Image (cartoon, rainbow, N blue to C red):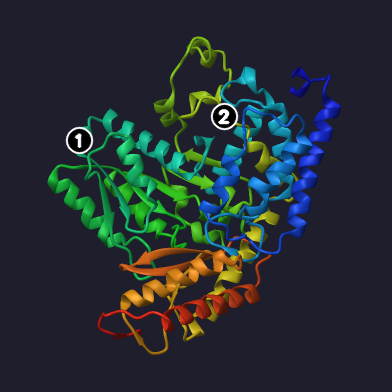
């Protein structure tokens, strides 16, 4: 069994096994003509359940052959131009090369004596990102598993800062918009805050937080003796790609002495844009920022970070253990990343971004994101002019929320069912993968564009497919509800 462990004695087997895996994936990608086979959980589960994990196959080639059946054949492929659903991107090849390196070396980014140069690379990338944001010379941060963890850590720091200034934890409040990410509420619960700790503020017609509403709520909190521990602004909402008016929100937070966290998990790609960086103006005033490189920087999952204006606030995540990061290590200036992180053992995910920047450059990454945003704007124009569809808002980033409407009359529930059926039908047929959400209680469809290889022709073809499925579904179903004009 030692022959299966990577060492100086098994390098040939390592080369052969990795090459076999790469060849298998490359062959699958080359033959993939749709984003998804449409297989159902009930159809795939028996294949997976039939695998006897107590009976090994003995070699990598056999295991890869089996993997073709239980995973690769029916995987959802984000590189395909008609994958239009969630915030999943095709990934940069330099980052995939980095995955092979970091997995083999297997550095753990908790302490210097487990990582050495990996720690310095991660720190350099944090400094680079902080500079792009404009957080100032005292900024710092750490890589995380994703936006949810970054938001949790940022709100932990905000809570501890508020409590450190004498605030009663029971009276702490988090203010965010109705379009903000669900992880804000999840974080509040994990932090032990009260059930009503998250105050949701209304958005304007462009799905952005209203500064006037924030001003009123901050004043109301003061009257009620409540303590706003953080305002969470969003630079790229999941459903609409909207960016809150950051300068106005930052000014209000400064006036009231409130921590400003900007969730830029989606919109962080603008940091590399040469044409649209101004859309993030105001982010430099944040106390903390979430970025997800595995969204708009075209990185494999996971590659994310949380950054703070004042590195001193990261002390709230610091715990010392004699076997790992004793207190004396800080005095000896030994850089242990676990001092900043909610995680202990942690992958060297920063290497993926490092390799991408060293091969493609930030301008190259930004140009790809700009292509996607240009496509989204063109798609909005097409949708807005198409009488078959209603589109909610013109995108700032690359998300389009819309629904099919019949040319005649139908009940609201029939319209809902027709849209949901259309989404399911294109997926089941392997024609496209489309997301869904709710707007004002009604079901809508959603395109999230992150693939520069997607064309307007792809989008219009999928719209035709959706309209066809919805039309046929409505024609074959009736309800007893009162009919209403679709418009």
Q: Earlier in the sequence, mark 2 or mark 1?
A: 1
The reply to whether callout 2 and callout 1 are in contact (CB within 8 Å) is: no
Q: Looking at the image, can residue 405 be seen? A: no
| Count of numbered circles on the image | 2
Q: Is residue 63 left or right of residue 86?
A: right
Label 2 secondary element:
loop
Q: Is residue 469 left or right of residue 54?
A: left
Q: 143 and 141: which one is in front?
A: 143
Q: Looking at the image, can residue 125 be seen? A: yes
Q: In the rendered image, which quarter is residue 277 located in? A: bottom right
Q: In the rendered image, which quarter is residue 167 located in? A: top left
Residue 123 % position (x, y): 60, 32
Note whether 368 is above or below 351 in the view shown.
below
Q: Which residue is most to the right? A: 12
Label 1 secondary element:
helix
Note whether 306 is above or below 34 in the view shown.
above
Residue holding disc 2: 346
Residue 246 % position (x, y): 41, 56
Quarter of the image where the C terminus is located? bottom left
Q: Is residue 415 left or right of residue 396?
A: left
The alpha-carbon separation of the residues under discs 2 and 1 comes to 33 Å
Q: Residue at x 80, y 40 (%)?
A: 20
Q: Badge 2 local density, few (<14 within 10 Å), some, or many (20+)?
A: some
Residue 170 is labelled as: 1
Q: 241 and 158: which one is in front?
A: 241
Q: Which residue is most to the bottom? A: 408
Q: Residue at x 66, y 61 (%)?
A: 80
């Amino acid at each position: 069994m030692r022959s299966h462990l990577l060492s100086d004695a098994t390098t040939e087997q390592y080369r052969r096994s990795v090459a076999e895996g790469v060849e298998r994936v490359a062959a699958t990608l080359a033959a993939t003509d749709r984003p998804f086979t449409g297989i159902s959980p009930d159809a795939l589960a028996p294949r997976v359940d039939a695998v006897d994990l107590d009976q090994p196959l003995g070699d990598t080639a056999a295991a890869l052959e089996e993997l073709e059946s239980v995973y690769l054949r029916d995987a959802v492929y984000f590189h395909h131009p008609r994958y239009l659903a969630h915030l999943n991107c095709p990934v940069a090849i330099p980052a995939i090369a980095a995955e092979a390196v970091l997995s083999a070396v297997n550095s753990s980014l908790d302490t210097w004596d487990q990582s050495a140069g990996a720690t310095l690379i991660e720190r350099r990338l944090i400094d680079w990102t902080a500079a792009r944001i404009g957080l100032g010379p005292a900024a710092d941060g750490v890589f995380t598993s994703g936006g949810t963890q970054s938001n949790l850590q940022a709100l932990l720091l905000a809570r501890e800062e508020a409590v450190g200034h004498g605030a009663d934890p029971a009276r702490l409040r988090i203010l965010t918009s109705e379009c903000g990410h669900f992880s804000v509420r999840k974080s509040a619960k994990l932090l032990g805050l009260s059930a009503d700790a998250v105050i949701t503020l209304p958005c304007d017609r462009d799905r952005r937080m209203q500064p006037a509403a924030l001003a009123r709520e901050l004043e109301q909190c003061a009257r009620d003796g409540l303590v706003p521990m953080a305002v969470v602004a969003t630079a790229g909402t999941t459903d609409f790609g909207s960016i809150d008016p950051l300068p106005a929100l930052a000014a209000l937070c400064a006036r009231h002495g409130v921590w400003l966290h900007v969730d830029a998990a989606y919109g962080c790609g603008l940091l590399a844009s040469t044409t649209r960086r101004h859309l993030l103006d105001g982010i430099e005033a944040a106390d903390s920022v979430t970025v997800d490189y595995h969204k708009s920087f075209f990185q494999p999952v996971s590659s994310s970070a949380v950054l703070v204006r004042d590195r001193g606030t990261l002390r709230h995540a610091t715990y010392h253990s004699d076997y790992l990061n004793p207190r004396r290590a800080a005095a000896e200036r030994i850089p242990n990343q676990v001092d900043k992180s909610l995680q202990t053992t942690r992958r060297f995910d920063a290497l993926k971004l490092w390799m991408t920047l060293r091969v493609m450059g930030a301008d190259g990454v930004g140009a790809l994101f700009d292509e996607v945003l240009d496509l989204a704007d063109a798609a909005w124009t097409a949708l807005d002019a198409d009488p078959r569809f209603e589109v909610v808002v013109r995108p700032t980033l690359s998300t389009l929320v819309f629904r099919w409407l019949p040319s005649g009359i139908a009940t609201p529930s029939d319209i809902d069912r027709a849209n949901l059926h259309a989404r399911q039908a294109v997926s089941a047929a392997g024609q496209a993968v489309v997301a869904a959400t709710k707007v004002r209680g009604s079901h809508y469809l959603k395109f999230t564009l992150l693939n520069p290889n997607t064309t307007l022709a792809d989008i219009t073809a999928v719209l035709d497919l959706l309209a066809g499925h919805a039309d046929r579904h409505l024609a074959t179903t009736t309800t007893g509800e009162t009919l209403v004009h679709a418009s």
